[in-house]
Image (cartoon, helix red, strand yellow):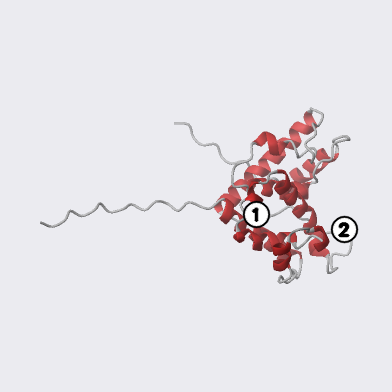
């Protein structure tokens, strides 16, 4: 019996910086995701009710429109790092365990009121890009999706949310996060709430007692 391979180690800060550099090195006309948007994109991929084939989600990492990127070491290494993060997020979401989203404070005044949304916006934009590319989640139409979607889409400008009256109604009831730490907590909570709808956990089967014979 072959022993199971251990899961790859989580990406380090150095790995994330390397991935960012590799994506930035891809030449035009490629429009690669930045690492924060990539992280949100991978969560949007993993929250689909049906697994998205790897070839389909990988194609949009180097270019959001899915245009082919030049083959080479840079692309191969970037995709390998992205696949490691995909696996890491897959395990966390499947087990409903905390993960650290790739969200970074803005370079300017971090104390500004809009700072949490400024920091979360690239992550949420990547998440939204996945939902636009792979529509099975939104096609469910489950009312239980609205609250977690509102937690995420609250970071968008309301004018950008067209034909989303139900979502905007819930967003209007939300208190904005006090700081970036609270915004990140809301982000992870939203992912787990969405997973409860699209990737429900299976409870272990309980052994049923055999039926009793009727008394004569």
Residue neighbourhood size for the residue with mark 2, other residues' Cα within 10 Å, grouped as few (<14), some (14–19), many (≥20): few
Rendering coords of residue 165 (x, y %): 73, 63
> In the drawing, what numbered circle is on residue 109?
none
Which residue is pictured at 56% across the width and 40% down the height? Answer: 6
Which residue is pictured at 65% across the width and 63% down the height? Answer: 147
Q: Which residue is mark 1?
A: 99
Residue 105 makes an appearance in the image: no
Side of 124 relative to 25 (left or right):
left
Q: Nearer the viewer, residue 212 or 115?
A: 212
**Marks 1 and 2, Cα distance to the nearest angstrom?**
23 Å
> Residue 76's quadrant in the figure?
top right
Query: Where the C terminus falls, by quadrant?
Result: bottom left
SS class, disc 2: loop
Residue 164 makes an appearance in the image: yes
> In the drawing, what numbered circle is on residue 107?
2
Side of 1 relative to 72 (left or right):
left
Q: Nearer the viewer, residue 189 or 210?
A: 210
Residue that sits furthest to the top in the current view: 71
Rendering coords of residue 113 (x, y %): 83, 69
> Residue 81's quadrant in the figure?
top right
SS class, disc 1: loop
Q: Of label 1 and label 2, which has the lower sequence position?
A: 1
Side of 162 relative to 51 (left or right):
right
Q: Nearer the viewer, residue 94 or 11?
A: 94
């Amino acid at each position: 019996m072959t022993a199971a391979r251990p899961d790859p180690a989580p990406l380090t800060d150095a790995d994330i910086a390397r991935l960012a550099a590799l994506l930035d090195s891809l030449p035009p006309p490629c429009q690669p995701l930045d690492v924060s948007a990539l992280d949100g994109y991978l969560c949007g991929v993993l929250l689909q009710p049906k697994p998205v084939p790897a070839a389909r989600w990988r194609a949009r990492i180097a270019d959001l429109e899915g245009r082919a990127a030049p083959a080479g070491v840079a692309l191969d290494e970037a995709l390998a790092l992205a696949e490691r993060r995909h696996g890491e997020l897959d395990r966390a979401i499947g087990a409903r365990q905390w993960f650290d989203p790739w969200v970074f404070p803005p370079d300017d005044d971090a104390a500004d009121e809009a700072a949490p949304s400024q920091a979360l916006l690239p992550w949420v934009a990547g998440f939204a890009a996945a939902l636009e590319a792979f529509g099975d989640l939104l096609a469910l139409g489950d009312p239980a999706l609205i609250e977690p979607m509102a937690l995420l889409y609250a970071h968008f400008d309301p004018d950008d949310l067209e034909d989303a009256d139900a979502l905007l109604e819930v967003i209007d009831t939300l208190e904005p996060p006090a700081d970036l730490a609270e915004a990140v907590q809301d982000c992870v909570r939203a992912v787990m709430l969405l997973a409860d709808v699209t990737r429900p956990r299976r409870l272990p089967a309980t052994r049923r007692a055999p039926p009793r014979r009727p008394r004569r």
